Image (spheres, coloured by chain):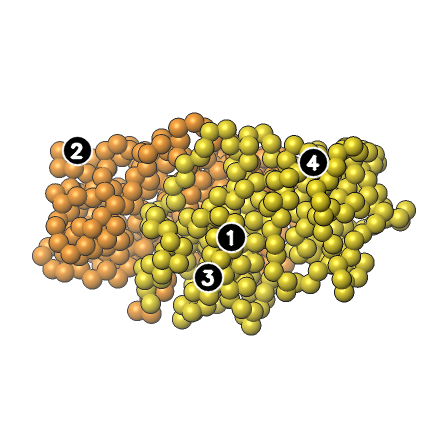
Chain colours: A yellow, B orange
């Protein structure tokens, strides 16, 4: 199969005859901000070749959609860069079917991408979302006294499909003072949110997923729930769990039931 | 070095304190279309570890900028996904310095990205450009009788830095009937342009770069000159070379001095 034939196959799967120019063209609506995020999935780092290609495709898109959810956005389109060994046409077909199933469910257009070959399978999914101008949820707005919440129990295992919290994120628009998604673990991600907001945090209670442990809920990655803060009198959306409060103190410092928490979630570059 | 420290380093190099949320935020201007493209650079496929990291960073951005140029766009921002083996902080620093030098020269903001680790070095650069609404140059507008041009001599060697033809592309706005950049070789790329436009092409003369050969100019990849068509009476920008004419015939068929040309530029998925 040639690259042209493969692109033709993807065009048909995506039902987007527009793919074919050097760039994808997008016409923004008035009074919207656009959100951009990109996430890599690499064989033997984020998945194994033995995993189902459709599950990998779905997950690759889901991780970027979760970033859009974290800012209260609505997904608009994605670009998919994919590299596989030669002769992987069937794998590519499965990958795109999984990705496009989730794209269809979340109304995310596949607008373009890049195909290449490589020894190991590699993909990078860029998603563009939109949000009313100036309204995007940021990491930097948490203030002392705010309550800290998560959108669900933490510590679920890797193999469960990610459900990007898009509806949940939109409900936080105009209410949450800060928000992010939990991709690298609560302790590390809350540390990052507190650094951006120049505040400290006090954790009281962590909701643990069935069959998981406190350690996994606190430090394990890949939850893809939303972590957010609300001022004391604002009500959280249904299904939220209050886990603590924002406090004055050393920016980024976290305490859990009065003990210091050392952030040790997933860091791609530490050697720990 | 931790991921946070590495991101801090990149923030400083990019002089963009905005990097830090789950997504980059972008506010479009009224009456513009946005252009999106993404290009992968993979170790042992597109470059070797022995190449200078700054040259690889520059080239990674240049290839995507060339796609923006091909549609007459002006670059606005980029997202950079990069995966390297652990302990490559110095390599990453060099890569970003090269990339940011070209970003600065072309006024492309580094808006965000993703860092991961991997056995081989991998990167994917997404660039967003803008163009007056409805004015982007496409591949699909070439008509029988149009003249075919390229923006420079063909067949240059890989190691020369790519100069994305951004100014040249903008000069074609409102004049060219079709345009694309030559990334995979003239024979294959012209074939693609003719397929999109549903026309055939007759080549008369190929301008060959000094020290190169006709075969390399016709079939070699990575030129990054623009290939475009103009109606008979429109003048091309200075520095253009006329190489032939668009004709009626089987869509995608190409003849050079009355012989059939079989497209055989670089195809990532053919086994030829």
Task: Looking at the picture, tell me which residue is in the foreground, B55 or A102.
Answer: A102
Task: Please tell me how crowded label 3 is: few (under 14), some (14-19), or many (20+) other residues with Cα within 10 Å.
Answer: many
| Residue holding disc 1 | A105
Same chain letter for marks 4 and 2: no
Mark 4 — residue?
Answer: A176
The disc placed on residue A97 is: 3
Q: Does the residue at mark 1 contact the one at mark 4 (Cβ under 8 Å)?
A: no
Regarding residue B55, the answer to whether it shows in the image is: no
C-alpha distance separating marks 2 and 3? 45 Å
Q: Does the rendering let one see residue B187?
A: yes
Q: Residues within 10 Å of mark 4 (few under 14, many from 20)?
A: many
Give me the C-alpha separation between circle 4 and circle 2.
56 Å
Residue placed under numbered mark 2 in the picture? B234
Please state the horizontal and vertical placement of residue A47, each as a whole percent of the image: 59, 65
The nearer-to-camera label among 4 and 2 is: 4
Do badges 1 and 2 share one subunit?
Answer: no
Tag 3 subunit: A
* Residue pictured at 48% horizontal, 53% vertical: A104
């Amino acid at each position: 199969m040639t690259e042209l034939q493969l692109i033709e196959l993807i065009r048909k799967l995506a039902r987007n005859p527009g793919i074919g120019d050097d760039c994808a063209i997008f016409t923004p609506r008035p009074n919207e901000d656009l959100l951009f995020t990109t996430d890599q999935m690499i064989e033997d780092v984020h998945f194994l070749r033995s995993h189902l290609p459709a599950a990998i495709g779905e997950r690759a898109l889901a991780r970027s959609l979760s970033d859009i959810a974290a800012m209260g956005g609505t997904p608009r389109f994605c670009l998919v860069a994919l590299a596989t060994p030669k002769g992987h046409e069937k794998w590519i077909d499965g990958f795109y079917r999984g990705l496009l199933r989730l794209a269809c469910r979340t109304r995310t257009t596949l607008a373009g991408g890049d195909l290449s070959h490589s020894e190991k399978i590699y993909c990078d999914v860029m998603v563009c979302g939109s949000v009313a101008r100036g309204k995007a949820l940021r990491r930097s707005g948490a203030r002392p006294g705010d309550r800290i919440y998560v959108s669900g129990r933490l510590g679920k295992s890797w193999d469960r499909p990610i459900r990007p919290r898009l509806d949940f994120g939109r409900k936080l628009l105009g209410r949450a003072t800060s928000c992010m998604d939990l991709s690298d673990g609560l302790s590390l991600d809350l540390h990052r949110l507190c650094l951006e907001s120049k505040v400290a945090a006090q954790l009281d209670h962590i909701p643990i997923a069935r069959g998981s442990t406190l350690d996994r809920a606190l430090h394990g990655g890949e939850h893809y729930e939303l972590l957010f803060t609300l001022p004391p009198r604002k009500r959280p959306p249904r299904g939220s769990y209050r886990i603590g409060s924002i406090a004055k103190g050393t920016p980024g410092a976290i305490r859990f039931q009065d003990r210091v928490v050392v952030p040790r979630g997933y860091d791609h570059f530490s050697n720990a």
